Amino acid sequence: MKVKLSISKKYAFYVSALGLVLLTVMLISVGIIVWKGADTLREKLREGTKENYKNNYEIMIINRATNFSNVIFNSLYRLDIESINRSIKNLKMPIKSALIADASGKVLTDGTSENPSFGTKLDIDFSLLKSRQSLITHTTEGYKVAFTIALGDHVAGYGELLFSDDPLKKALQQQDEIVFSMWKETLRRFTGIGLIGILSILFFTTFLGLLFSRRLASPLLKLRDATKSITKGDLQHRLEIQSTDELGELADSFNRMAEELLMTTVSKDYVNNIIKNMNDSLIVVSPDGNIKTLNQATLNLLGYTEYELLNQPIGIIFEDKELASQWAGLIDSMKESSLIVRNIEKIYLSKDGRRIPVLFSSSVICDPDGKIAGVVCVALDITERKAAEEELRKHREHLEDLVKKRTIELTKANEKLQEEITERKRAEETLQENEEYLKILLNSIRTGIIAVDADTHNILDINPVAAEMIGLRKEQILGLPCHKFVCPAEVGKCPITDLKQTVSLSERRLLKATGEQIPILKSVVPMMRKNKRYLLESFVDITELKQADEALRRSEEEAKRLAQENAIVAEIGRIISSTLNIEEVYERFVEKVRELIPLDRVSINFINHKEQTSTVVYSSGVEVEGRRLGVAIPLSGTIAQEVLRARSSLLFQGKDLKEIANRFPNMPPLIQAGFQSIMSVPLISKDEVISIFHFRSKKPNAYTVEHLKLAERVGNQIAGAIANVQLFIERVQAEQKAKSFEEQLRQSQKIEAVGRLAGGIAHDFNNLLTVIKGYSDLALIKLKEDDPLKGNLKEIQKASQRATDLTRQLLTFSRRQILEIKVINLNTLLQDLDKMLHRVIGEDIELVYLLSDPLGKVRTDPSQIEQMILNLAVNARDAMPSGGKLTIETANVVLDEIYTRTHIGVKPGRYVMLSVSDTGCGMSPEVREHLFEPFFTTKEIGKGTGLGLSTVYGIVKQSGGEIWCYSEPGQGTTFKIYLPSVEEEVTTLHHEEDDKGRLPQGRETVLLVEDEISVRGFAAQVLRENGYKLLEAANGDDALRMAQVYAGKIHLLLTDVVMPQMGGKELAGRLKTIQPNIKVLFTSGYTDNAIVRHGVLEPGSNFLQKPFSPVTLAQKVREVLDR
Amino acid sequence: MESKRLKITALVFTILMSCIFSYVYAGNDTLRKFKIGVIGENPDKAITEFEPMANYIANQLKEFNVEGRKVVVEKDLNGMINKIKNQEVDIFFDTPFAICKIQEKTDMIPSMLVWKNGLMEYRTVFFVRKESPINKLTDLKGKIIVFEDPGSTSSYAIPKAELRKKGLTVAPEETKGLPANAVRYVFATGEMNQAFWVIQRKADVGAFNNGDWDELPEKVRAELKIIYETEPILRSLAAFHPHLPKKFRNAVEDILFSMDKSPEGKEALHSASRISKIERLTDDDLKSLKYVKDLMRFID
């Protein structure tokens, strides 16, 4: 939309916009200057702070270093390292670390108990340090200051202190915060000032704009108004502008021009009055054919308004449309010949389409240059004259036509009269013959014929056949009304009203004298005889024919119905065989039934004889409250109960409904739903009603007996099929369940078998590892620090530790690991593990906890659970190399019997669920199948042992729990772990005091029984070296003999559990008879939980897991002896 | 005359018996405190440490009319000897050397082995620099040995005695007029200092117990080597006052031997200078004690 603005508003707008632009530029400039200023200020302050900090900090560093040097000089001089260490420990921030070296630069101590820097060379330029008191260097860690520890010329050594950069960072941060707050404050003020400025400028510029516009635009506006007045013919209008500038001159010129115009111009009013008062139509047409001026007479004549005709083509008022197209040529020709058209007849067309004949004249008007300025057209209305002429012409033509017609009529009448006379003579002759012939014919044919008076409809004549059909004599019939016998139901409705009309053969009824009506085929022919109107009705008895037709029709309908039923039954059979989806069977079955039986609602209810309920398994159509899908309805008081009792269909409709409503308390919902027809059909299979088929319709008496029979027939057909489908579905579900169980069992057995194998291998490994690890530990203790073999032994120690870890994982997987069972809260454990989890998964993975609080407690080994969660987290991390989300969730759940039926091995009860989910790459079904198998890994070679998830599996199983994995490729993975919930109090976890790995000693007598000679040798050596007296035996028999002959007290029996001939438990039992107070410590590499806890050994037995180190053995022996 | 003498004798006997009965009767009825004796520089600290143990024992000696307890602290051995002589101490805890010394002066009966910090014995090790040509004690003639401080048993008394036992002359470094082959000693006031004095060649050899050796930083230990270890020496012993009734002693012993079996007892033991448990002395222990007594002959 284009906005029309006055010149004054434009002035105001331009001035305001200019002012605003200038202000904006100014504000931006000021803003940039302020920002740059603030930034420069910030930089300067930072530099200043840095410089200041550097200077002050360096001074402080030098002072601290000097002080420290003085403090420790004495200690270093006396080589009192412990005192130096104490001084270092007393150092406070910002000193992060210290190194003290001797005069040769060799570091003596860094103040820590491990002293890892000892012996290294101090990394400083000693020559430079000689000339200065201290050297300061800046490193990424902070400021390092090296200094000489000396008194006078006596140099005791050197020191190096590392000062943290934190104070500088803090100072810079504070500086930035100050600058930022200043900038914020300035910006706030600047914004306020800016806003006030903008508003002021807007106001000021608008005011200026209006002022200027008044001054500049006012004369122009006056000039515009004066021009408009002059144009309208007001030649008296003058401008009043008092100005000496160009505008004043313009006003004077304008006034002079108006004076001259007034003097030279004829009055337009005068001309207008002439035109206005003309009776003839006057139109001025422009050279291009458009109407420029017209008078009132024209408007009156044509019925247009002035507005409708002005500037319209002249052709609009002429009947002759070609005139418009020829107008230009006409004008030209008029110009050339200066023609003036006078009094020619033309037809005008009025607005409402009337033709108006006019006497038309025109003349050309030219401008001073001789060019045609227009054509003046004058027209005189000659309508009345033309009408009179036309009336006269019509009268004359009418008279001529009348004369011609009368002459022709007279001629024809004469000819016709002659023809009729001849014809009548001939007809009278033949009529006599025909009457005779017809009489014979009427009496001989087997068609009843009645002649009826067309006016009174009384029978005038009747042939014998008709009388016989009526069952009366002719005399009894004649004179009686025809409708007494023929078409008795159509009295007063005689189809024949016109003698020209004929009623062709139609089926009617004939009322015999006996009162019986018989079907007839009747035709009626009207006739005139002796100027009297007759109706000749002929008819034949079609009773037999109708009976045959009816029989045929019924036969066809029955055949059709049967065919339809059979087709539907066949279709139903096809439906049943095409799908096992019972819902689909119901749907399509009902769809077919609906084609035969009208219904507003249909439902199939499954009968539960045991629970005496009826459940809606399918419904279609109108919903009924309390009869929705899946709703189990008690049978009592229902129609279904009656159907079951009667074992037959029921049909209630019309009055029946009200009567039975009282019998069935459950009927009201059906009646309220508006059903007026109710039909229920039992579906019986194997002599048992399995379902009931309910049909409901809102129409009264919607169902017939045929419908009922049809419903029963279809119901009988479908009942068996439904039963079969249900049986089949149950069988398939049972097979699927069995298959699922079989698969779970197979998987479980496979993992169990692998576990047993792993456990067996681990047992032998543990024996070997005990020897390898034990002797390497012993050798390491005994070797001197500089012994070249020490490195090799450490490698052996590391390797054996790795092997021990692997074996432990195998044992965990095979559930043969000894657990330190405690009652814990998984949420607490996760809180403790949080830091480590973050370290494990890295920064790219978001860790989310969804912890249920309060959470049930579980009995398990917390360290094992920690291991399990870490293993799952590591796997999740590896599945999300580009980052993602790891969600750990806990919840209290109840696994019911339904769940346990589909998950083998799970017992119903309360569980604590731990779920670990990632958004990683997920797993294929093939990978999932082998997920928990040991040594199965999808990671690159060397990146995974394949024991992570198998360990998890073992931990969960050993804790009496269950683990399930849900994963799809590209959809992430979720592990759900269910641990049995317990009501016990949480065990307080505390850590034993570290005894720095010292070997506890003792002087008791220990009987060591071990069939593995190498293990026995190692254990004996460890115990002997720690003060114990040792009795060694390779088997149980030797041990017993030894105990019998040994005179002193045997304090402890240290025995392997599994040995040939006599096991550890039996040996311990028999030894108790010899040494009643002997304590027993069992050891084994095969830590089957069932053997240790529930089989061979009693609960609470002392047990030492192989492989064991010298420290572990010595500590455990001591612990048992001290117990 | 004979009759008069008999009467006098009967009277004296009667008076004597009355006194004895009075003493016994009075003794049984008088409430007494159970007294533990220890030597310590800081009496308050020692009392705080040993009070839980004294309480624990005293509470179980009600049948002996024990009511209350007392921890007797003396700063030196002589003070303790006086206290023992005055029967102000029922049981005394200290090192084998102190016990042996007190046994000589007071007839105290050492009968219990005291485990400290999980250990019952230690050995003193002699160490030198890794590259040192010194390989046995007799190589130390004319060398400087660094001990911890004069109050240390394992790092002064034992090594000094062991050297003397080997026939070496051992004297302070500053002693004038020593023979050239004498082993001179200095004090470094700390095990770590001892190691550094040897490494930095301020001394030729150092000596402290094997526990201290184990606690040296690995890098420091790597610059040293052990040239000699003494026989094992019991860490600590307990001795009863000889005048205590046997029945009372047995009762106290039973309490002490079972203290580590109960949490309260264990805590009380640990409070008392980190005692782990207390056992009856065996023959082996007595042998070790004999070794200590043997060494004591060489201690000033």
Image (cartoon, helix red, strand yellow):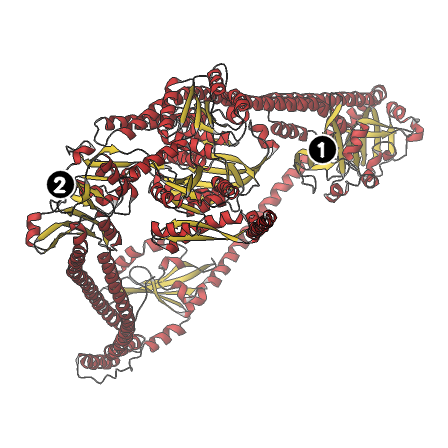
Indicate the amino acid at tag 2.
Answer: Pro
Indicate the amino acid at tag 1.
Answer: Glu
The label nearer to you, 2 versus 1, is: 2
The disc label shown at residue A859, or none: none
- Closer-to-camera residue (B286/A223): B286
Q: Residues within 10 Å of mark 2 (few under 14, many from 20)?
A: few
**Mark 2 belongs to which subunit?**
B
Q: Is A993 above or below relative to A1063? A: below
Secondary structure type for disc 2: loop
Residue A450: where, in percent of width, then height?
84, 29
At 14% from the left and 49% from the top, the residue drawn is A158
Residue B31: where, in percent of width, then height?
54, 54
Residue A1033 appears anywhere in the view:
yes
Question: Which residue in the rendered view is the most extreme toward the bottom?
Answer: A242
What is the C-alpha distance between the residues marked 2 and 1? 198 Å
User: What residue is pinned by disc 1?
Assistant: A420
**Mark 1 belongs to which subunit?**
A
**Is A79 on the left-hand or right-hand side of A690?**
left
- Closer-to-camera residue (B219/A451): B219
Residue B120: where, in percent of width, then height?
38, 37
User: What residue is pinned by disc 2?
Assistant: B179
**Is B12 on the left-hand or right-hand side of A338?**
right
Q: Is A707 above or below relative to B209? A: above
- Closer-to-camera residue (B92/A719): B92
- Closer-to-camera residue (A322/A996): A996
Residue A832: where, in percent of width, then height?
42, 44
Q: Are marks 2 and 1 in contact (CB under 8 Å)?
A: no
